[in-house]
Structures are given as structure tokens and as C-alpha cells.
Image: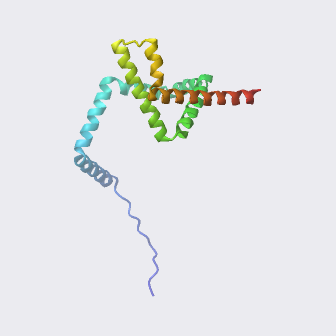
Amino acid sequence: MAKAIRQISKSVPNPIDEQKESIATLLQAIGDNREALMTTLDIIKGLHEMGVLDAAKSMLEQREDIGAIAMQQANQTGVHNIVKNGMTAIQFVGSINPEQLQSILQGLYTGFERMLDVVKTGEQKSLIKLGSSLRDPDVKVSLTTMVEFLHGMGEAFKRENEKVN
């Protein structure tokens, strides 16, 4: 049978040896990452020269006051509306088929290009030319699209009015 262990010797590390080992580890890490550390120091130097570090330090010292002001500003009615409108816009954009949105945005881009060409040249079409452009298939498609957009928008407005009344 084995002998019972009656004494447990606890090894207490020497603080001086621990400190030497820590310094050696740090020096090794500095040597291994010299380039990254030099870049970091250059960035910090640039931020210091611009005054960013002083500003950040001041903001940290005054964080309670800054936090109180931020909460007051965030609590205003306008901010609530901005957040609600932003969320509604995100939901709207999320509901659009990406291919359809791409098509619409490409149409807007092309239309703006043609509009800017007219603005640059100062070209003005006569009323007869404007009227005859209604026969152009591109103009017909665009006008039909815009009229259908107006119909849909009117339907939505009518539904909203019925909800209110």
C-alpha cells in the first residue's frame, strides 16, 4: 500500500523572478511586433498633434455631463421622429425587390444625365416637338409608369383617410 501524504509543499513564486519573466515576455513581444508598434505610435503621435487625444481625455473627464446632454438631446421629439422615419425608410427599402430598385435607379440616373445635357446646352423644344415626343415609346413607358405610381399613391392616401375618419 502507498504511504499517506502528510505534508503538501506549496511553491510560492518569487516576485522578483516573476517580474523578470514578465519583462522578458514583453521584450520578446515588442521585438516580434516592432513594425506594428511603430505604426501604432505614429498614429498616436498624429492624433496627439491634432489635439484629438486632449479632446478625448477632456471628454472622458466630463463624461457624466456629456452623457446628460446627450440624453437630453436624444429625448427631444424631433429625434424620436428621426428614428421612426429612419426605421420606416429601412423597412420600405427592405421590401423592394433589388432588381426592381436597380431598374428604377438606373432609369433615374439616365434621366438625370439627359436632363443635365439639356441644361448644359440650353436647348428648348417647341410645344409641337414636346407634344410629338408623347409618341416616343420611351416617353410613353415613363409616363405610364408615373401615372400608375400616382394611382398607387392616391390609393394609399385614400386608405389612410378612411382609417382616420
Q: Residue at x 37, y 16 (%)?
A: 118
Residue 56 appears anywhere in the view: no
In this picture the colour scheme is rainbow
In the rendering, at what x and y percent does residue 127 appear? Answer: 46, 12
Above or below, 122 against 154 in this view is above
In the rendering, at what x and y percent does residue 77 appear? Answer: 63, 23
In the rendering, at what x and y percent does residue 102 appear? Answer: 44, 37
Q: In the figure, residue 50 lies in which quadrant?
A: top left
Q: In the figure, residue 107 lies in which quadrant?
A: top left
Q: How many marks?
A: 0
In the rendering, at what x and y percent does residue 119 appear? Answer: 37, 15
Q: Residue furthest right?
A: 165
Front-lying residue, 20 or 8: 20
Front-lying residue, 42 or 89: 89
Above or below, 41 against 114 in this view is below
Residue 136 appears anywhere in the view: yes
Q: Residue at x 36, y 11 (%)?
A: 122
Q: Residue at x 42, y 32 (%)?
A: 106
Front-lying residue, 133 or 110: 133
The quadrant in which the C terminus is found is top right
The quadrant in which the N terminus is found is bottom left
Front-lying residue, 89 or 142: 142
